[in-house]
Image (cartoon, grey):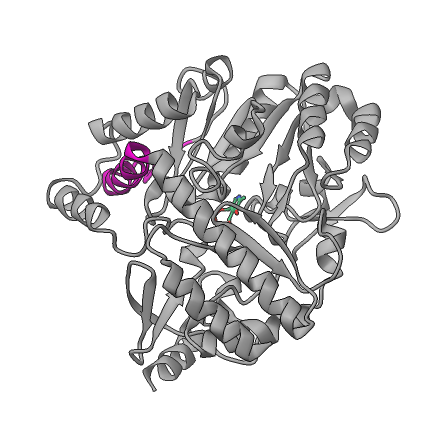
Amino acid sequence: MRNESIFNESQKYMPGGVNSPVRAFRGLNINPPVFKSGKGQYIYDEDGKRYIDYVGAWGPMILGHCDEDVVKAIEETSRNAIAFGAPTELELNLAKLICETTDIDMIRFVNSGTEATMSAVKLARGFTGKNKIIKFSGCYHGHYDGFLVSAGSGVMTHSIPGSAGIPVDSVKNTLIADYNDIESVRKLFEEYGDDIAAVLIEPIAGNMGVVPAKKDFLEELRVLCTNYESLLIFDEVMTGFRVAYKGAREIYGIEPDLVTYGKIIGGGLPCGAYGGKREIMEYLSPIGPVYQAGTMSGNPIVMAAGLATLNKIYENKDVFYTKLEGLGKTLESKMMEAANKRGINITINRCGSMLTAFFTDRKVENYHDAKQCDVNLYSKFAENMILNGHYVSPSQFEALFLSIRHREEDIEEFIETIEKIF
Ligand SMILES: Cc1ncc(COP(=O)(O)O)c(C=O)c1O
């Protein structure tokens, strides 16, 4: 059993045997499979077992694994250009493509979603000259100290570090509000309005499971930010190019001041980006006073993989997103039907090709609702799905992602397994 021996040895050399905690399957009674290869909607572990993949590397693999055009772009670029730490035409091409097709003026590439959001917040602080930010319970924006906060008991506005190793001082400028609750935001603006640099939000949350924002909530958020001269930052690291080409912005028709991207824009290679209005972006060094840099930023191979991915999506985008919506809809309705048949309570929140089945009979509209779910039941579900060759997230508070390579037959197989498990 190579899976087991590799994972056991990994634990000697890497904490928990992993490089990112969720991969360790700590909430499940099985070890994580160790993966060797992937093609289309399939991934294969070290023991040769095949899985239909519903994690998609946590979002990036929207074209499926090892898409031929992406592989070709990586291969061809890597023959001539691995890294320069200097300008290339590839980065111009990707910047131009993203700016022109998503209607932003300027963009800066970084190496991860975390870097994108932390840099966007720094830029917002530099631009507005203000210190505080508002984030929402249940939204995740990466592992930057200022984002890893929990609401202090009792007083909602008092944040405490959400991880060991974070000084209290690092979170004192992070205010926490409740998702889909505009009054909780209004209160913070009333109290701290002249010092709030930005409101940072996942406009469709994926990190408490999928929880879409209500349209009027986002509209009012936009108005509050404008009135108080704070920047509205949409974190579209997960939703950008996923829920629609232009992300949640396109779905809601609401314009943030800054947007962050990651995941899909690098075609599966390490990439993040933040962008927005020219007058804000020009606050960045070397033309402006806000310093942010990166040796690997705009790496040519990453840019080539991103270009191949986004070009492929963009060239046929209506058909592309219609197909994903169709697959998502089938999955949602058949899963609901299977649960109803067996008397299992689930609530499904879905936006296009990202979906979460919450084990509860209630609506899930914020983090409090999400936490009421039966996570033990979810863990059993995930364990059994994975053992039966359907690779789903080990945690209730994540999304299930479809790729353009999934077929109706895959979903049927998925439902057959679910019926067995339920
Ligand atoms: C919405 C959102 N923002 C930021 C991040 C952080 O991105 P990364 O893991 O690439 O640092 C994530 C990661 O899942 C995310 O979902």
Q: Residue at x 32, y 83 (%)?
A: 2
Location of the N terminus (image quadrant):
bottom left
Tell me: residue 282, above or below residue 371.
above
Q: Is residue 240 magenta?
A: no
Give the residue furthest to the bottom.
1
> Is residue 190 in view?
yes
Q: Residue at x 48, y 52 (%)?
A: 328
Q: Is residue 314 magenta?
A: yes
Q: Quadrant of residue 271?
A: top left
In the drawing, does residue 203 fall left or right of residue 37? right
In the drawing, does residue 60 fall left or right of residue 147? left
In the drawing, does residue 177 fall left or right of residue 99? right
Q: Quadrant of residue 14?
A: bottom left
Please state which of residues 322 and 81 is positioned toward the viewer in this rendering.
322
User: Residue 381, percent across and down?
Assistant: 58, 73
User: Residue 197, percent across and down?
Assistant: 66, 24
Q: Residue at x 47, y 19 (%)?
A: 281
Tell me: residue 360, above or below residue 102.
below
Please state which of residues 43 and 257 is positioned toward the viewer in this rendering.
43
Tell me: residue 208, above or below residue 322.
below
Location of the C terminus (image quadrant):
bottom right
Please state which of residues 119 and 268 is positioned toward the viewer in this rendering.
268
User: Residue 130, percent across and down?
Assistant: 67, 22
Q: Give, as a single range, the part of the protein colored magenta.
A: 293-316
